[in-house]
Image (spheres, helix red, strand yellow):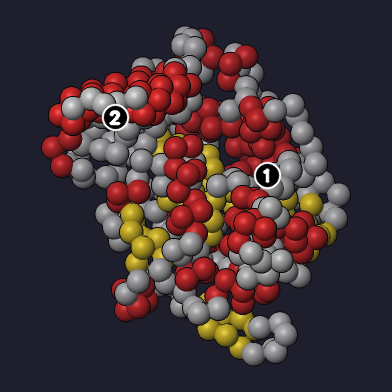
Amino acid sequence: MESDAFAYLKLFRLRIRRMHSVPRISRRLFIIICCIQVFLLLILSSLRLAPNVTPFDVHEYFPNIPFLRGGKTTISTAQQADSKITLLIPIHKPNLQFCRCLRTHLINGFEPILVNLGIDNGGNRANKYFKIQGVFNYIKRNPDKLRPYDVIAVIDGFDAYSQQGPDTLLDRFKESGQKIYTGVDKNCFPNDPSGPVCNNIPESEYSPDAFGPDTDKDKLWADRRHTRPRWVNSGTIIGYYDALEKLYDSMVNYKAPDDDHGSDQRLFAVHYYWGNFSVALDFKSRLAVSVAFSEWELDFLKNSSTIKELGVKPWTGKVSNTGQDVTIDRRPIVRNRLMGTAPVFVHFPGVARGLMTGWEQTLWWTSGHDNATWILTDYVLDKVVTVAEDQRRYTFREICGSYVRPWGKLAEPSMDAASGHN
């Protein structure tokens, strides 16, 4: 259907070329009719592209466990004060977009551990599902390095930027008192929208009229801008080691119908529905925000005093070739206007993926300082990441150096010729 729409656009251009001899009024009417037809075709395309979910009897597979909303931690204050944080990024093969995301994590002071690097399980769906196995493998292999009260964050490798650092993430998570937090979504993807996994869960913490009279009245899967977020988004996970070990152990050993496999998000949604793994959703966007269908609720905050009130601190570091100390304000920074928060991670799943490059050019690590792009890219070149499976260590230069352009931005090598740089 989508290809039909684009084929129609080509036919439309051909017809326009043949319309020069037709009176102007008729030409205008013809153009209006054609535009309406293209619009309708694109709408039908979006409907057809909605997830093809095979309904099944959820109670045949899911036990009837009463729901518990999140779960407060019993970790002592002294243990929390001693907690350390680990950032895991499942990624089987680096590319340009991964390198752009990785650069932001290194700029902000994270020391990422790459999970599943070089392990291709046979396609996108299989690799998504194997994210769970890879994270679980890391947790089980490192009991001597990870204490029950240490914190692990797991984020998608290709579509999540960080705009603040690990200290902020750790402090905010500990302040929440929760055992596990996940991102929150406006779609119950990829589960059956009429089933209990999508419906027998708590309501959104957004107010019932958060988006005016049309709140929660969206009908199309492809347009959820007026829907309050309510469902799990597994692109950002953060939790205490002991709680995540139990959760991932259950997901790895979960016996599900064949159509469940291939989606880590479906398994997270199922376990959230069960309610016995103390999973809570980050409605306030203090840790992460999902941009999908939410870009109208977000803005690029530039006001220094407001940014300071949100607890956002400037970036500080050294320029490698001079050793000079540099301070760069973290502005503009993405803010959730409804919640009044500036999240640590900004996640661009699904329909929001096309916004990533444009937003990156607006955010502080690109535009917050006259030479921010080069200073910060230079800063990360020799920062190190570790591979979970064999503990190999690579610098950013070794993994992503082929994408670094002379002016500090990351782009495909072919961009040099087009831009005139070499």
Of helix, strand and loop, which one carries label 1? strand
Q: Amino acid at mark 2?
A: His
Is 29 situated left or right of 275 in this image?
left
Q: Determine if residue 218 is in view.
A: yes
Residue 401 falls in which quadrant of the image? bottom right
The residue lying at 65 percent from left, 30 percent from top is: 124
Residue 207 falls in which quadrant of the image? top left
Of helix, strand and loop, which one carries label 2? loop
Residue 30 falls in which quadrant of the image? top left
Closer to the camera in the image, 273 or 198: 198
Mark 1 to mark 2: distance in Å? 56 Å
The residue lying at 54 percent from left, 32 percent from top is: 265
Label of residue 90 in the image: 1
Closer to the camera in the image, 307 or 72: 307
> Does 121 sit above or below residue 92?
above
> Does 204 sit above or below residue 151?
above
Residue at mark 2? 20
Q: Amino acid at mark 1?
A: Pro
> Does 358 sit above or below residue 20?
below
Q: Quadrant of the C terminus?
A: bottom right
